[in-house]
Amino acid sequence: MEINEPYKLEILESIKEDSITIYHIGNEWWDLCAGPHVEFTGNINKNAVDLESVAGAYWRGDEKNPMLQRIYGTAWETEEQLKAYLHFKEEAKRRDHRRLGQDLDLFSIQDEAGGGLVFWHPKGAIVRHLIEDSWKKIHLQHGYELLYTPHVAKADLWKISGHLDFYKENMYDQIKIEDELYQLRPMNCPYHILVYKRKLNSYRDFPIRVAELGTVYRYELSGSLHGLFRVRGFTQDDAHIFCLDDQLKDEIRGVLDLTEEILLQFGFRKYEVNLSTKPEKAVGSDDIWEKATTALKDALDDKGWVYQIDEGGGAFYGPKIDLKIEDALGRKWQCSTAQVDFNLPQRFDIFYIDSNSEKKRPIMIHRAVLGSLERFFGVLIEHYAGDFPLWISPIQARILPVTDTEVEYCNEVMMKLKAHGIRAEVCHGERLPKLIRNAEKQKVPLMAVVGPKEVESQTVTVRSRFGGELGTMSEDDFIGRILFAVQSRTSL
């Protein structure tokens, strides 16, 4: 009160812990902070300090609160560390998915429709389709059954699941339809349980694996929205496995294998893996927690992955494995998770009939690989700086005539490529150097240049963004090489 710091007083009032930390530099500046701070400002290397920007920010991210001025800066021990950081920062800026999404015409977030709602443009939608198609094929190969479920349900369903008690602040207001209250879904789990309950299940039916690319809706304040990384409506690559106690380890191992297979397709080979164990407040007996945690550990050990144990970091309903992928800049992104759930099977009273004709409760596993398609697409854009691998590039080949007299032959080549499922287009009307520059800016992986000689010999001269000049080749050779590269997930 004495130094007129109302915001720090508000923070103090909201802290529930028994103790707080306050750091100060001399007697001039006091800070409510986790710290630490330097003891004297003279300890700061003035040649390793960078004041980055000034921006407005709503207090606590809520647009109803006052707008404050936020100063961004950074300090390092050495100039070399500062230079490395500034290089990283520039590279991150170059890869920013929000800018690339606009430059490459992949997606937008339209003010007229509201914040946090993604519009997938044709090129972005093609990439999404390829991701989804690959995801579905792999899941079917691994014994999953695909589901499609509604975007809304009666509010009572979310009372049973407990979301209205524990997750209400992240849910939108209810909708009244013919005297019944409905709710936009924040999760897919209750729907999958209802599908499980549609019939009486026997122990012989297990494991049961169901998967869905299900769109969910979460209440987010405007100040917390961030491109594709934090949105209000997004699609989870959700799956749930119902299994018996003695199947848990193998099912978790299967999840890890499937996760690795999918992530490798997109070029992610480095992971940070964490195993989170029982927290203080939890449902389920110590015995079942120990069995589940041991099964997760054994599956990770069998897989040979290095992992850290987060003691007490599990959800209240069961232990979990979290996996963060590492991108080209070494940043880590939370994507994949496998969580054992002792709570929802009990809340929804799901059971199966065992070999003694008795009712038993199955184990339920929540599982996602990509996490959110929107967020994963943002990570993918930044990982590749918009230079997508050939197999998921929106346009795989752009055919460029030297003059307009070659346009007819270019169109013939384009149609042959499209007949083989290759995404190709013809661009003309400009001089060849500009056509090439435009293709480079749009990050088209392959350019096929056509002049009088190519028309006469029925060939194309190919240039790859990744492999440089590839020379002149026949139409069939060009098509064959593209198809092989797509099949093998490589580039020309």
Image: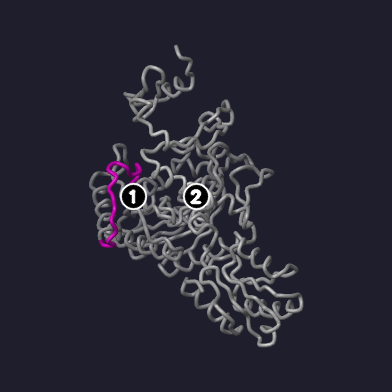
User: Which residue lies most toward the front here?
Assistant: 47
Residue 80 in the figure: left or right of residue 137: left
Q: Which residue is mark 2?
A: 92
**What color scheme is it?**
one colour
Q: Secondary structure at mark 2?
A: helix
Magenta stretch? 302-318
From what the image shows, is residue 5 above or below residue 426?
Answer: above
Question: Three-letter amino acid code at disc 2?
Answer: Ala
Residue 303: in magenta span: yes
Depth check, front residue: 462 or 167: 462
Q: Residue 429 occupies which quadrant of the picture? A: bottom right
**Type of residue at label 1?**
Lys
Q: Which mark is residue 300?
A: none
Q: Answer whether residue 114 is magenta in the image.
A: no
Image x and y of residue 439, in percent: 63, 65
In-front residue for pair 183/197: 183
SS class of the residue under badge 1?
strand
Q: Quadrant of the N terminus?
A: top left
Measured from the top left, where is residue 52 in percent x and y?
Answer: 51, 37
| CA separation in Å, label 1 and label 2 | 31 Å
Residue at the image point whose x is 57% and y is 43% from the top? 182
By secondary structure, the bulk of the magenta-drawn segment is best described as loop
In the shown orientation, is residue 440 left or right of residue 328? Answer: right
Tag nearer the camera, 1 or 2: 2
| CB-based contact (under 8 Å), mark 1 and mark 2 | no
Mark earlier in primary sequence (1, 2): 2
Please determine whether, in this image, residue 221 is positioned above or below residue 249: above
Q: Which residue is pictured at 38% across the width and 31% down the height? A: 44
Q: Quadrant of residue 465?
A: bottom right
